[in-house]
Image (spheres, rainbow, N blue to C red):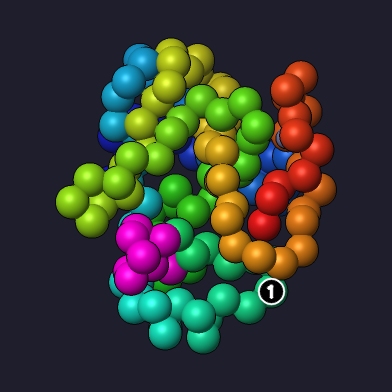
Amino acid sequence: MACFKMEIRPSKIHRYGVYALETIPARRKVIEYTGERLNRKQAKDRDRGNFTYLFAVDPYWTLDGAVGGSGAEIINHSCEPNLVARIIKGHILYTSLRQIRRGEELLIDYHFTKDGENTKCRCGAKTCRGIIEK
Ligand SMILES: [Zn+2]
């Protein structure tokens, strides 16, 4: 499911992160976000606490990356990401926004829309919004 060599290791931003082990050109599919497919009610039941790996595909279906995840669920949030999520025919594809160098951490803007507590952002980008709107 990962289209390039990458590895999971400790991150300065949050716990663990995913790092490129080779150069990734711009606008390429990098990894697919996979997980158990949950309907609206199942997703609501599972959505507890801060560390969930739920990703809404559409208003009805959500993927839980904690079960059968590809590793994409480990990718940290940044206000200045190098990946963007595209939803194509029920699949969540993380694609590169620009060329990513070998050794760089893969980062995505979570764009949380759910209500609840805000989490402090530690991405370190100049344009950091300060919080992850959760
Ligand atoms: Zn930030």
Location of residue 26 with respect to 131 vertically, above or below: above
Drawn side of residue 124 relative to residue 100, left or right: right
Give percent across and percent down for residue 90. 23, 56
Give percent across and percent down for residue 68. 37, 66
Residue 68 appears in the figure: no
Location of residue 57 with respect to 42 vertically, above or below: above
Give percent across and percent down for residue 111. 56, 46
The one of 100 and 111 positioned closer to us in this rendering:
111
Residue behind mark 1: 49
Drawn side of residue 97 relative to residue 77, left or right: left
Q: Quadrant of ligand 1?
A: top right
Drawn side of residue 126 relative to residue 92, left or right: right
Residue 58: say if magenta.
yes
Residue 94: say if magenta.
no
| Residue displayed at 45% across by 59% down | 55
* Quadrant hosting residue 62: bottom left
For the C terminus, give its image quadrant.
bottom right
Residue 89 appears in the figure: yes
Q: Is mark 1 within 8 Å of ligand 1?
A: no
What range is drawn magenta here? 56-64
Give percent across and percent down for residue 132. 71, 47
